[in-house]
Image: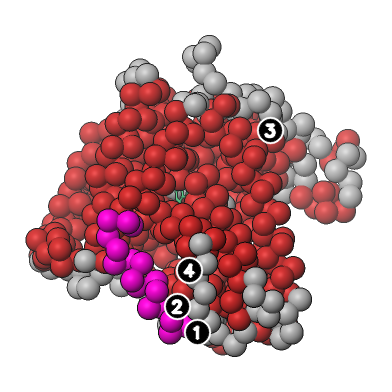
Amino acid sequence: MSETREHWSNSLGFVLATAGSAIGLGNIWKFPYIAGQNGGGAFVLIYLICIAIIGLPIMLCEITLGRRTQKSAVGAFRMLSPKRSHLANFIGFSMIFTAVALLVFKQYGWAVVMLMLGGMIIRFGWTSVGIIGVFTGIIILSYYSVVGGWTIGYIIKAFSGKLNYVTEQAAATQFNAFKFGLTRVIVLQIGFILLCALIIVRGVRNGIEKWSKILMPLLFVLLIILILRGLTLPGATKGVNFLLSPDLSSLTAESVLVALGHAFFTLSIGLGVIITYGSYISREQNIFKSALSIVVLDTLMAIMAGLAIFPAVFAMGFKESAGPGLVFNVLPAVFNSIPGNMGWLWAGLFFILLAIAALTSGISMLEVAVAFFVDELKWKRNKAVVLTTAITILLGVFSAISLSNWDKIEWMHQALVSAFNIKSASFFDVMDTLSSNWLLPLGGLSIALFVGWIWGIRKAIEEIRHGSHNFADVHLISLLAGLKDDPSHNNANYHVLTLASIWGIFIRFITPVAVMSAFLHEIGWMSFK
Ligand code: TRP
């Protein structure tokens, strides 16, 4: 354990930084529009269930792995992995087998991906989970930063009075014109990545923690202001109902999968961000409580973002199912339709909010790769930041180009179409689908399997007990009954229904089965209909 490792100054620092990572474009941009497309309340309900049975348990795994090893993703797995793991070998060989099957179906691109992953797993065992995480962080940031750049552009537009249209039509036209201004989009994107880099380079306490402590409260205040504005409009209740009253008949198997994928994305789990942030916690903190606070904060912010957006959208008579453009093109029009001519202000505040959320998430993706170079290869932080920033920019530019002038990189388009059988999606979509639908759930599944079956729940719980004041050994039933402090209930000799044993059952069985069924459905081997 390195003596010089930087730590958060206290639990609040950790919780705010990690909530900063979790709360991002996923909550404020993506959640409202996928809720809008998937029928509102019922989708929200499924999403909440996914958060509880998959998100929270995996979040706790990642924090525990990080704090135990005091290492970032790759190092954590390397330290705790057994020399030889039959499960890892089995998974590795299954992937190679799958690759062969894919070849038969002429899915060459996917076959190569599977082959590489399988080979890596056989060679590096469980450590591959960390390695894949480092790549995934860069992949996500590469397209995330495009949207991050848009938010900065829209702040400028709002305050210079350029978002002054009132119809959806005009909004869409403007948004498209904006997207097609390629140079500007790329400059903004690079600006966004550089902002992340500037924060990261200052380190854990003076960079990530300091800025999270400033930006997160600001985010909260901005959101409250926007909610109050939205809720006080006549007709706002329709929006509230849309978001909060579930109509189960509108639910499809697809929406369940979308909800599951989003649960990973929104909590930043599955790629080692939380392992890395967890590695900066000292042993006196109650990680059970921290995990719960982070998950609750993230969920709360998503619901609040919905409450800031839908009441206004419904009150002003706009469509809720506008898709990815919902906040960029519909929202400014909605704000301008509000009487009082303050649309520029509401829009400006909203895009500041969005930019802040994106920034605190962006830095966390960069940190995974940076921490890898610092921990494993003993690089200086500055050098690591420069390299990862450069790689992200290089990869990210393709996403930016692909959203406007996809045909400018026709060779890449063609290559992707023939290799991955992706018809019309842009490079941006390919990166998004690859990471949110595949790499994150795969990472989350591996983390759960590793903690549940390889490292072991017993060792994990030993780690969680540090600083948690017996929280892990409290009986759920006694907790609910208000008997948490009754000494006879806290007998460590039997574990029935303690929080620890419930968590163990989730990690070993429920979470893996849930993620696995989603996968099987996705590749068409299982149907829920
Ligand atoms: N959770 C963030 C959001 O909701 C995005 C994010 C940050 C992320 N770090 C991540 C997603 C790591 C997956 C993995 O916008």
Query: Counting other residues with Cα less than 10 Å from the Cα at mark 2, is it few (<14), some (14-19), or many (20 or more)?
Result: many
Please provide percent x and percent y for residue 27. Answer: 55, 60
Asked if disc 2 and disc 1 are in contact, CB closer than 8 Å, the reply is: yes
Element at badge 2?
helix
Mark 3 to mark 2 CA distance (whole Å)? 43 Å
Q: Does the beta carbon of the residue at mark 3 sit less than 8 Å from ligand 1? A: no
Amino acid marked by disc 2: Ala
Magenta range: 168-185
Q: Earlier in the sequence, mark 4 or mark 2?
A: 4
Query: Counting other residues with Cα less than 10 Å from the Cα at mark 1, is it few (<14), some (14-19), or many (20 or more)?
Result: some
Query: Is 176 in the magenta?
Result: yes
Q: Nearer the viewer, mark 4 or mark 2?
A: 4
Residue at the spot of label 2: 171
Report whether residue 477 is seen. yes
Residue 248, quarter of picture = bottom right
Q: Nearer the viewer, residue 152 or 57?
A: 152
- 277 in relation to 430, above or below: above
Residue at the spot of label 3: 11
The circle drawn on residue 167 is: 1
Amino acid marked by disc 3: Ser
Amino acid marked by disc 1: Thr
Q: Looking at this rendering, what residue extends furthest in the top direction?
A: 3
Element at badge 4?
loop
Q: Is residue 298 left or right of residue 152?
A: right
- 343 in relation to 503, above or below: below
Query: Counting other residues with Cα less than 10 Å from the Cα at mark 4, is it few (<14), some (14-19), or many (20 or more)?
Result: few
Please provide percent x and percent y for residue 430. Answer: 28, 61
Amino acid marked by disc 4: Lys
